[in-house]
């Protein structure tokens, strides 16, 4: 990758500035502090990679806020880049958050083909890693944070694998492998969750079984109570029927008794009426018999008087006839008196016969117990039934919930345990397969680490003596920690020793060698990484300053585009007189 030019429309203190960089030499920009050198470097980085989306740790504001233009409305840069044999025109408007890539030959918008971070797209180094190894600022030189991205990229290059494949990436992917159980989980977490759920189900099943065992005696008593309830209900139903029959019998007997009493009353009344009729008849007959007797007496006396001559013949005969008439009339009326109220008497005699026949029937006698006795028995059974129901309900509150929970949950729990057992076996098989694959790939990755460490060590050990001849043998382990050997005494210095014991200038040179070694190795077989150096030798003495600049201009610039920004005017003026300078360095004004 080579940056051909950058046109800064507005970025920090820079506005309407265009810089064109040479293709065959290192570009050097020398200017005083606070004139925009570091801002230019930040603009190049932002043009290639954009800004981080979020505020970084320790930053008071987002980086995009830091570089807002001072004196213009536009907040944008344009760049022309040669990469992959293609010339691209890049437009970034930071105020509008837009990103456009055009083919410079056709002017066609091809933005959709690229990631907004072009370093990640072409160099396979996201902004943070590109900044870590290729954006070297003097004040931050003596530090280096290794990342898995850089390790992975080294492994890919060593293995000759594709952009998205390497043993280390595969191992990382296997370490991050997910097993879907309710959600995507790492395999250990998935197995742990399955086991936890299975133990929860087992514990619940054991609880249900224990609860069922604990209420076994109550369950037996509940069965007895329910049986007693049924027995009492049957007895109560029988007593209800018996009570109803007794009530009906008693009602029938009462009705019959009332009818007999009414018959006796009617019989007395009929007999009394008959006696009254007979008395009336006797009274009437007595009167008429007396009249008849008087008439007969009168006739006899008158006749005797006529016979004896006691009286004149005519009066005597008349009196005799009167007597005979009276006697005849009295006899007739006496006969009629015997027929007084004859129709009523006949009716009464018939009624008497009917009433006597009713009273002649034997009175009904209720069979069985009396209703009040049966009702008392019913009340006793109902009380016993209520007590039995209360006992059954009490026992059911203890037993029923346990039994219902057992019946309701156990089948589902057993099925869930079966499913979880199968799921656990599947997850464990998957985990074993992943572990086996990881073991194999880890061996490949370890060999890859060894190979890229050898290559990285060779490059770094070649670079370091040109920057600081007091140290040599710069070596990395597979975690990217490094050591150097001090030539004067042969002592191997660990990275912690380097940070603690070396002077600032010496540390700068060691860490610059580390970064250049990474740039060199990561450019193998792909795009060359452009290197931005912002006062990289700020703490170096004049001799090491000159040695370092010459090495970078003559050697590093052959493999990488080198952009150097510096405030050391006098030093660079002195270097400009050197024979190597003019053919390897192109000076630009800020």
Image (tube, rainbow, N blue to C red):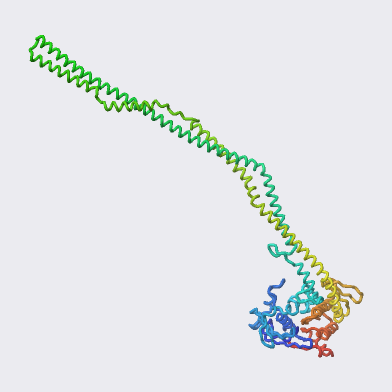
The relative height of residue 474 versus residue 310 in the rendered view (above or below) is below
Q: Tell me the quarter of the picture where residue 472 sits.
A: bottom right
Using the rendered image of the protein, determine whether residue 533 is visible from the camera's viewpoint.
no
| Residue depicted at 79% across the width and 71% down the height | 168
Residue furthest right as drawn: 489
Quarter of the image that includes the N terminus: bottom right
Whether residue 486 appears in this view of the structure is yes
Q: In terms of image quadrants, where is residue 192?
A: bottom right
In the displayed image of the protein, which residue is found farthest to the top? 308
Image quarter of the C terminus: bottom right
Q: Residue at x 21, y 17 (%)?
A: 289
Q: Report the number of numbered marks.
A: 0
Q: Is residue 98 above or below residue 214?
A: below
Horizontal arrangement in the rendering, residue 468 relative to residue 258 (left or right): right
Q: Position of residue 77 (x, y in %)?
A: 68, 83
Horizontal side of 92 relative to 252 (left or right) equals right
Quadrant in which residue 457 is drawn: bottom right
Viewer-proximal residue, 426 or 522?
A: 426
- Near-viewer residue (195 or 129): 195
Question: Where's residue 276, x and y in %?
Answer: 28, 23
In this rendering, position of residue 38 left or right of residue 311 = right
Q: Residue furthest front?
A: 307
The spot of residue 270 in percent (x, y) is: 32, 26
Whether residue 462 sits left or right of residue 149 in the image: it is right
Q: Residue at x 50, y 35 (%)?
A: 242
Give percent across and percent down for residue 403. 64, 47
């Amino acid at each position: 990758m080579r940056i051909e030019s950058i046109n800064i429309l507005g970025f920090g203190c820079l506005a309407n500035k265009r810089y064109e960089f040479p293709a065959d030499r290192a570009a050097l920009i020398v200017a005083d502090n606070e004139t925009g050198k570091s801002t230019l470097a930040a603009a190049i980085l932002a043009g290639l990679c954009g800004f981080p989306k979020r505020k970084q740790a320790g930053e008071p504001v987002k980086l995009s806020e830091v570089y807002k233009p001072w004196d213009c409305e536009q907040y944008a840069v344009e760049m022309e880049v040669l990469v992959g044999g293609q010339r691209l025109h890049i437009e970034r408007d930071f105020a509008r958050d837009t990103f456009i890539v055009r083919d410079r030959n056709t002017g066609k918008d091809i933005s959709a083909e690229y990631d907004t971070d072009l370093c990640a797209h072409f160099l396979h180094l996201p902004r943070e890693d590109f900044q870590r190894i290729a954006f070297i600022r003097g004040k931050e030189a003596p530090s280096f944070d290794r990342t898995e991205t850089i390790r992975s990229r080294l492994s890919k290059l060593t293995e000759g694998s594709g952009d998205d494949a390497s043993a280390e990436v595969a191992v990382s992917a296997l370490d991050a492998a997910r097993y879907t159980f309710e959600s995507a989980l790492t395999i250990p977490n998935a197995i742990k969750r399955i086991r936890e759920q299975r133990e929860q189900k087992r514990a619940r099943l054991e609880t249900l079984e224990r609860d069922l065992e604990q209420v076994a005696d109550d369950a037996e008593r509940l069965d007895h109570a329910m049986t007693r309830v049924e027995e009492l209900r049957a007895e109560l139903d029988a007593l209800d029927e018996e009570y109803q029959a007794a009530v009906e019998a008693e009602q029938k007997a009462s009705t019959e008794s009332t009818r007999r009493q009414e018959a006796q009353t009617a019989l007395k009344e009929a007999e009394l009426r008959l006696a009254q009729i007979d008395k009336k008849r006797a009274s009437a007959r007595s009167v008429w018999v007396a009249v008849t007797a008087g008439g007969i007496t009168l006739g006899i006396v008158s006749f005797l008087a006529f016979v004896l001559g006691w009286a004149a013949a005519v009066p005597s005969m008349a009196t005799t006839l009167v007597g005979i008439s009276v006697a005849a009339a009295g006899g007739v009326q006496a006969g009629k008196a015997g027929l007084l109220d004859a129709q009523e008497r006949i009716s009464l005699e018939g009624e008497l016969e009917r009433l006597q026949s009713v009273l002649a029937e034997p009175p009904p006698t209720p069979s069985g117990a009396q209703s009040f006795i049966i009702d008392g028995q019913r009340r006793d059974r109902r009380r016993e039934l209520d007590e039995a129901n209360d006992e059954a309900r009490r026992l059911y509150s203890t037993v029923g919930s346990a039994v219902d929970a057992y019946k309701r949950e156990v089948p589902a729990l057993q099925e869930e345990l079966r499913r979880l057992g199968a799921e656990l076996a599947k997850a464990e098989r998957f985990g074993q397969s992943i572990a086996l694959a990881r073991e194999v790939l880890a061996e490949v990755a370890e060999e890859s680490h060894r190979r890229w460490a050898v290559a990285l060590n060779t490059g770094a050990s070649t670079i370091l003596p040109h920057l600081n001849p007091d140290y040599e043998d710069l070596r990395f382990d597979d975690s990217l920690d490094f050591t150097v050997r001090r030539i004067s005494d042969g002592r191997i210095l660990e990275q912690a020793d380097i940070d603690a014991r070396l002077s600032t200038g010496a540390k700068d040179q060691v860490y610059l060698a580390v970064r250049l070694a990474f740039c060199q190795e990561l450019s193998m077989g792909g795009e060359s990484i452009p290197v931005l150096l912002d006062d990289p030798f700020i703490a170096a003495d004049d001799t090491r300053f000159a040695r370092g600049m010459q090495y970078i201009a003559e050697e590093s610039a052959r493999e990488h585009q080198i952009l150097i920004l510096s405030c050391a005017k006098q030093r660079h003026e002195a270097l400009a007189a050197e024979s190597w300078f003019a053919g390897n360095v192109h000076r630009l004004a800020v």
